Image (cartoon, helix red, strand yellow):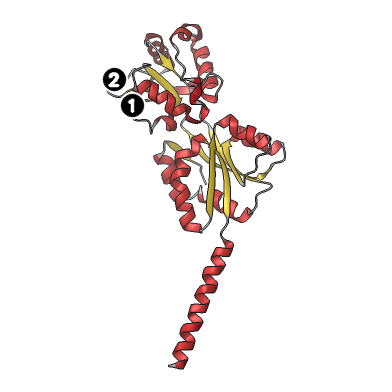
Amino acid sequence: MKIRLRIAAANIGFMFLLVGGIAAQAAEVKVLSSNQMKTVMEDLGPKFERATGHQLAITFAGLGAVVKRVKGGETADVVITLREGIDSIVKDGKAAAGNVTVVARSRGLGVAVRKGAPKPDISSPEALKRTLLAAKSITYGNPAGVVGIQFAKVLDRLGIANEMKPKTVFYPGGAGEAVAGEAVGILVANGKVEIGVFHFHELIPVAGIELVGPLPGDLQEAIVLSAAIMTGAKDAGASKALVDFLRTPEAATVIKAKGMEPATP
């Protein structure tokens, strides 16, 4: 009996040491991410925490705001945003090029209409041009934002930039870039505009609208989202564990479900 008690006590002691070791290894990873990955990270974050024991402290911001905040001195362990923004951060020495990993690619800009409305023809550049000219109103977000700049180029290429100006409605300035995709979708869902254009995956969650499809052909400009482990990361191992997790088959399933394409391993 005494021998058994000693063995039991030894086993309990081992379990305490094991649990204590795991707790000691657990870290908090501070993440600064662009809104394009918001729905993905909200889904994958808890899964990562359960799988690793690490905790995530995630802040979301607009594409331009992420880079601006990092350049302004805000610290983070991992930054997720457009590859162009990450390249700028690397150039400033805030992250090493070898610590940058592509995690997802967007399907580019998509066209949405109010739920139940006829879906217009956008199957070719010419078809899109006819659809936009026939529309009573359109919206595509902040004209100074990433989408606004991209779609303004599309209108220029189609040769209808001037014709679209009087029928373009922008969401209220107070909406901010952080909720731009949702704001565009709501304008369409409420019937305030006929056609909305924004990043495909950001329109998917908005209720009351239907996606017609992505912009046709070479009018499309997909975006690449990358994750950078910052030079000053408090726990490089935990930060790498997160980036690696975003490249797993489980993460790929979620990324696809959110309307984007996972990175190729």
Q: Secondary structure at mark 2?
A: loop
Q: Which residue is mark 2?
A: 117
Instruction: Work out whether mark 1 precedes mark 2 in sequence or the reverse, and give the earlier one.
Output: 2
The extreme front residue here reads: 174
Residue 90 percent coordinates (x, y): 68, 39
Q: Is residue 169 visible?
A: yes
Q: Which image quarter is the N terminus in?
A: bottom left
- From this view, report whether residue 167 is shown above or below residue 28: above
**Label 1: how many Cα within 10 Å (few below 14, some 14–19, many 20+):** many
Q: Are marks 1 and 2 in contact (CB under 8 Å)?
A: yes
Decide which of 214, 38 is in the foreground and name it. Answer: 38
State the residue at coordinates (68%, 38%).
Answer: 73
**Label 2: how many Cα within 10 Å (few below 14, some 14–19, many 20+):** few
Q: Secondary structure at mark 1?
A: strand
Residue 14 percent coordinates (x, y): 52, 77
- The alpha-carbon separation of the residues under discs 1 and 2 comes to 8 Å
State the residue at coordinates (46%, 56%).
Answer: 50
Q: Is residue 215 visible?
A: no
- From this view, report whether residue 131 is shown above or below residue 197: above
Residue 263 percent coordinates (x, y): 51, 42
**Number of disc labels:** 2
Q: Is residue 136 left or right of residue 141?
A: left
Decide which of 3, 135 is in the foreground and name it. Answer: 3
- Disc 1 residue type (three-letter): Glu
Q: Which residue is mark 1?
A: 210
- Disc 2 residue type (three-letter): Ala
Residue 74 percent coordinates (x, y): 65, 39
